[in-house]
Image (cartoon, rainbow, N blue to C red):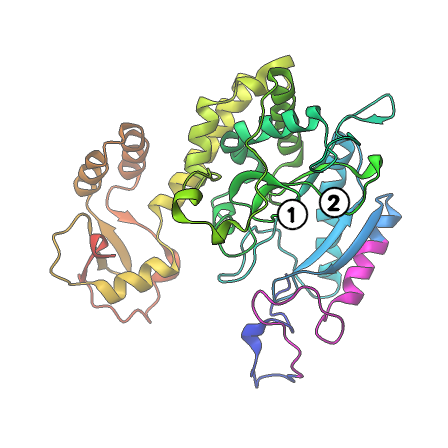
Amino acid sequence: MVKRSEEGFWNSGDATKTNLGHKPRYKEGYFPVSPMDHHQDIRSEMVRTLQKVGITIEVHHHEVGTGGQAEIDMRFGELTAMADNVLKYKYIVKNVAKQRGKTVTMMPKPLFMDNGTGMHVHQSLWKGGKNLFFDAKDSYALISETARHYIGGILTHALALCAFIAPTTNSYRRLVPGYEAPINLAYSKRNRSACIRIPMYSKSEKAKRIEFRCPDPSANPYYAFSAMLMAGLDGIEKKIEPPAPLDKNIYDLEPEEQAKIKGVAGSLEEALDNLEKDHAFLLKGNVFTQDVIDTWIDYKRTNEVDAIFLNGNALTFQILSVKRNQNIPPRIRFRYVNGWLETDLTQCQDWLRSTGDERKLAQHSDRFLALPTCIKNSEHRSGTDSRKQNDEVNLSSV
């Protein structure tokens, strides 16, 4: 994704600079050639640089999103080596872009109404030069019983895994219906909305693998890859059979049938809650330790979940500016005073208490005590704010 992208569809008709058109529309960028693809040359330079440091690249091309969304695929390797390569990959593509006056982002969902960015992880287990996931006699997708149980482990622990593989609040802007996002806890050899896909490009033993599509590039690869492996191994150890494969178009199913399909976590908070309940499989062999799990959950809740919950954003202010002064009983009332968005501590605590979530109340009470009179947003202190001082707004009307 590139800053002020020359191919960003939002720049169509921009008369402030030379505008030669050829801008892919939202969700229509897969995959064009030049001149619609503006970034063949910069991707090629990224690939050459990655190859210079020993990373084998199999393919690169434009992706679905406008604004320069791209895919560069690395060849498979062992777990730790691949985690190392992910960090090298991020460093190199960002710096090559900077040299060209561009900016690369690894945000899972940088653009509203366009496809997000995933980090699909292809996985297989090998022993003695043999692929343990391959079975030439399997009638469905040439996968072995070991592979099925590995899939069963991933699906069983998927909600807890989300805390490591989709570890930001922005991750859950991506995991929504309508953008090819893998939101359904199912596996399939062709359905891209299922969270696990079995590629069928080749019948070769060497090519047989599963593709877990939920992870995104905001993940720490060392944690994410290790957590996925531990979930899969737990499935093998316990012989967990996954549900039957789902090859139908999930969005065309009848509501009763669709309701039977479980989904991934809907928020980072939900993912952390599930990790808190389901992490025994990660502790086997001291791969993860209890203090690592506890620290991760605490840090994410305090610095990301609570921070987003307590702070306004541009859309919040837009909604509030339209909805203010409506005659709806207040749940929490805010008012603008000297450019700050102020609220009352007691009202906020009462509202949290009314939700019945004592843990959330305890967490957020500490936050309100630290900032007892206001939720601050420095970008909203400018003199251009057209709101009158002491205008009240009603959050419950949103």
Q: Secondary structure at mark 1?
A: loop
User: Relative to residue 361, is residue 144 drawn left or right?
Assistant: right
User: Relative to residue 357, is residue 308 drawn left or right?
Assistant: right
Query: What percent of the width, then of the height, locates residue 161?
Result: 55, 31
Closer-to-camera residue (376/394): 394
Query: What percent of the width, then of the height, locates residue 240?
Result: 58, 22
Dot 2 surroundings within 10 Å: few (below 14), some, or many (20 or more)? Answer: some
Q: Is residue 40 magenta?
A: yes
Marks 2 and 1 in Cβ contact (< 8 Å): yes
Closer-to-camera residue (18/236): 236
Closer-to-camera residue (234/282): 234
The answer to whether residue 97 is seen in the rendering is yes
Query: What percent of the width, then of the height, locates residue 335?
Result: 20, 57
The quadrant of the picture occupied by the C terminus is: bottom left
Residue extending farthest top: 285
Residue range corresponding to the magenta coloring: 20-48
Residue found 20% across the figure and 68% down from its top = 388
Dot 1 surroundings within 10 Å: few (below 14), some, or many (20 or more)? Answer: some
Disc 1 marks which amino acid?
A: Arg
Q: Secondary structure at mark 2?
A: loop
Query: What percent of the width, then of the height, locates residue 313?
Result: 38, 56
In the picture of the structure, the residue carrying the numbered disc 2 is 200
Q: CA distance from mark 2 to mark 1?
A: 8 Å
N-terminal-most mark, 2 or 1: 1
In the picture of the structure, the residue carrying the numbered disc 1 is 190
Disc 2 marks which amino acid?
A: Met
Q: Disc number at residue 104?
A: none
Q: Main secondary structure of the magenta part?
A: loop
Is 182 located above or below residue 20 in the figure?
above
Residue found 51% across the figure and 42% down from its top = 184
Is 259 located above or below residue 146 in the figure?
below
